[in-house]
Each structure stands twice: as C-alpha cells, then as structure tokens.
C-alpha cells in the first residue's frame, strides 16, 4: 500500500483509539478467570486480534463483537489446543504469553512470529529456562522457538533495563503456579508505567501482588483470577500523533484521553509543554493549539513508543533537540533511530545519530517532494504522515499499510481531520 499525501493543515475533533497496552492486558487477564468478563472499547488491530486468537487457543471462550469481547475464562487451566502459536509481529503478545503457555506442561510448543519479531531478544526467558531445566531451542537464535516443560514457582531475577514485557508475562503466570514466587529487579526499572498498567489490571481480576518499590514483586501462588468488566481508555501513544499534528497545524481536540491515566506515554504532555506547546487538559480530553516549539533534551527510556513522532516535532522546533536513552528503539518493528533519521532527512530535516542518541537541529519547514518508506513500522508510517503537514511538496509513503498493526483506522482519521490522501 502506497499513500500520496498533499501537504495540508489538520484540524477538528478526534476520538482517540483505545490503549493497545491496556487492551492486551485486559484480554489476557479475562481469559485466565474462573468467570465471565466484558472488555469494551476495543480496536481489533492486528496485534490485539493476535492476542485474542491465542487466548482462545489457550482455552478461553471468546465472543467477539464490533468493539468488545465477552470472555469466559479458562479458570487458569491453560490447556493449549494448537501447539503452533503464531504471534505475528506483536512483541507484547509473545513476551506476555510465553510464560503463560508454560504454566503447565502442554507438550512441545512452537512459538513463531513475523517481520522483525523473529529477531527480537528473549534472553531473559532463556536464562529462566536454563535455571529450571525447561527444554528449548531456537532457529539460529531466531524464531521459531521450540519449547517444552512447565514453569515452577521460584525467585526470578530480571534486569531492570530490558523490556518490562518480560515482567508482565511473569506477573500474569506466577499467581497460577503451586507455591509463592518473587521477581527481583536488578538495577533501576525502566518503563515503570507499563508495569503499573499490568498491576492495575491484575487488581481488577482480584490478583494480589506486593510491589516493593519496583525493586521486587512478591506473588502468592494458587490464586484465582476473577471475572471483571472493563472499558479501555484512549491510548497516549496514539494521541501523541494528534498532539504533534495540532502543534504543527491548527486546533485539534483529542477525546477519550484520561488526565489521570497510568500510561507511561502520558509523558507526551509534559514533554511538548516543556518545548512550549499550548495544551488545554481536561478530565477526558486534550485540546491542542498551534504554536512554535523549542528544542530540549528528551529521555525516552520510559516512553520509547512516542519517540518517532517526537522526532518529527523536534525536527520542526527551534534549536537543538537530543533524544537520549533510546537504545530500545533499535529493537522495535524497525530500528527507529535509523529509520526516523533516514526518512526525515529525505524530507529535508537535519538529524544525526550519536550512538543511541538522536541529535536534531530544527528547521522551519520540510521540502518534501520525495518517496519515503515506513520500514514496515506502524509508528514510522504515522510519524511521516504528521511530518507531511510541514512539507512544501507532496510526499509518497511506501508500505503505508503498516498502520494496521496498532491503528487500522489511522488513514481514515487522517482524512477526517482534513488530510489529503490518495492511495496508489
């Protein structure tokens, strides 16, 4: 799918899609209960559909509506019907479900993926498997992963600077095991906000976890997940695109974003305000007004998913911006340090890499008039669309269908806000 965009300003009102992070977590927790749950305000992107299909395979009975799921849980008895588990390109899904799949011995499992996911590191789990004698093998260090055995209650040491998704996978699984467990975090924990989302959903399902200041987590075994109803709030990683669009163009009112959200990507608000953006923040919406922003230092260690669109804003802000602690951007759907530098520089930005830091010298506008590529990365595709606002000439985005991964209605929403788009 190729998209041609004629540069124009965006404005209006937008309903922000539901949080992908909360959606994954709610669907998984509801699928492990001993009762019925209803998860509302869902957007069935490829990632969320992948998690839903896997939880059906794990024994949950799921009725799917247009924007909701009714789920009868498997009572924590994860009996896997199809031992080939396809996670597509969803890093959240695969890291959440690997330990859940091992909550009992289901024979040999094949866990597979697509795209860049096949290269993502899983060393945190491999160390646990080695310690517990769980049999596994990879394909030259890549997916598919062949695995057999069952997880046992234990003390689990996890590095704090790796993805919090490993911690979430363990937090979901350990309450199901015989015996109590502890997760010990080695070094400072990055992405605390994502762990907070997990703890909130577990609390809804009546699961008890003792959080010792993010240094360790104590989890009693033999717990029972209870059914719950939940309506998913708007996604701060997605509203980030529209916040930047409003700053660069005209007034945009973003609805269904909660002021008191636990989402780590809520950092977008503080960051753009520090750069000089004018926002009006209410309980469930954010109104964005156009204006000039200034460069700053942005630490994305706790909020890597908003880095691509912040790179766009920085490229069009006055002075220098440094996006630091960005090493985890290297192992997303693309190497987002390199992909964003490459594609925005094609448009006329001034960006360079210094190790795992992006150094951006702002310009007033972008030239455009070229073809740019999404690198099959949903957030790169959407960030380039927002960059088009400040281009002097039309741009062509190749592989623009990558948005299906998290935000399948993005191009429709872009057009509804005044975007001029043609599909090639």
Image (cartoon, helix red, strand yellow):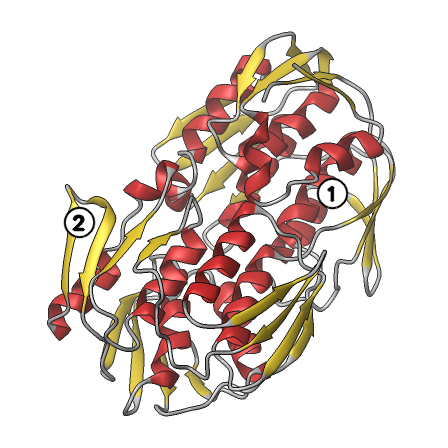
| Residue at the (20%, 55%) spot, across then down | 146
Residue 398 placed where, x, y %? 55, 19
Mark 2 burial class by Cα count in 10 Å: few <14, some 14-19, many 20+: few
Position of 25 with respect to 294 (left or right) is left
Mark 1 burial class by Cα count in 10 Å: few <14, some 14-19, many 20+: many
* Residue 124 quadrant: bottom left
Toward the front, the furthest residue is 81
Q: Is residue 182 at least partly visible in the picture?
A: yes
Which residue bears the numbered disc 2?
138
Position of 370 with respect to 161 (left or right) is right
The secondary structure type at the circle numbered 1 is: helix
Residue 341 placed where, x, y %? 48, 25
Of the numbered discs 1 and 2, the one sitting upstream in the chain is 2
Which residue bears the numbered disc 1?
243
| Residue at the (37%, 75%) spot, across then down | 78
Q: Quadrant of the C terminus?
A: top right
| Residue at the (51%, 86%) spot, across then down | 34
Residue 102 placed where, x, y %? 28, 71
Residue 303 placed where, x, y %? 52, 52
Q: Quadrant of the N terminus?
A: top right
* Residue 131 quadrant: bottom left
The secondary structure type at the circle numbered 2 is: strand
Which of these two is toward me, 278 or 388? 388
Q: Is residue 179 above or below residue 16?
A: below
Question: Gap between marks 1 and 2, in whole Å?
Answer: 42 Å
């Amino acid at each position: 799918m190729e998209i041609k965009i004629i540069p124009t300003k965006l404005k209006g009102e937008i309903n922000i899609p539901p949080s992908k992070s909360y959606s994954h977590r709610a669907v998984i927790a509801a699928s492990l209960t001993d009762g019925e749950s209803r998860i509302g305000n869902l957007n069935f992107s490829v990632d969320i559909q992948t998690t839903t299909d896997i939880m059906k395979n794990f024994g949950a009975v799921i009725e799917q509506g247009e924007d909701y799921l009714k789920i009868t849980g498997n009572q924590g008895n994860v009996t896997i019907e199809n031992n080939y588990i396809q996670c597509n390109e969803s890093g959240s899904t695969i890291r959440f479900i690997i330990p859940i799949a091992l909550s009992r011995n289901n024979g040999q499992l094949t866990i597979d993926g697509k795209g860049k996911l096949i290269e993502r590191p899983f060393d945190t789990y491999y160390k646990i498997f080695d310690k517990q004698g769980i049999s596994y093998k990879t394909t030259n260090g890549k997916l598919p992963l062949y695995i057999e055995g069952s997880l046992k209650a234990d003390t689990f040491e996890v590095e704090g600077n790796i993805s919090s998704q490993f911690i979430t996978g363990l937090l979901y699984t350990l309450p199901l095991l015989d015996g109590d467990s502890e997760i010990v975090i080695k070094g400072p924990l990055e992405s605390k906000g994502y762990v907070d989302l997990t703890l909130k959903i577990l609390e809804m399902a009546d699961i008890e976890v003792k959080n010792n200041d993010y240094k360790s987590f104590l989890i009693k075994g033999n717990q029972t997940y209870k059914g719950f109803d939940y309506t998913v709030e708007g996604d701060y990683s997605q509203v980030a695109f529209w916040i930047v669009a409003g700053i660069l163009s005209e007034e945009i009112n973003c609805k269904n974003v909660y002021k008191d959200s636990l989402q780590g990507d809520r950092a977008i608000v503080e960051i753009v305000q520090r750069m000089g953006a004018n926002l009006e923040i209410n309980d469930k919406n954010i109104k964005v007004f156009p204006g000039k922003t200034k460069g700053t230092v942005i630490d994305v260690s706790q909020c890597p998913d908003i880095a691509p669109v912040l790179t766009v804003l920085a490229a069009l802000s006055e002075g220098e911006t440094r996006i630091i602690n960005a090493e985890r951007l290297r192992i997303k759907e693309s190497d987002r340090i390199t992909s964003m530098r490459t594609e925005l520089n094609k448009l006329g930005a001034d960006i360079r890499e210094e190790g795992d830091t992006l150094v951006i010298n702002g310009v007033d506008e972008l030239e455009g008039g070229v073809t740019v590529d999404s690198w099959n990365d949903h957030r790169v595709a959407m960030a380039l669309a927002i960059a088009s606002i400040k281009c002097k000439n039309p741009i062509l985005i190749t592989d623009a269908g990558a948005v299906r991964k998290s935000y399948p209605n993005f191009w429709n929403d872009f057009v509804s806000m005044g975007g001029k788009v043609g599909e090639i």
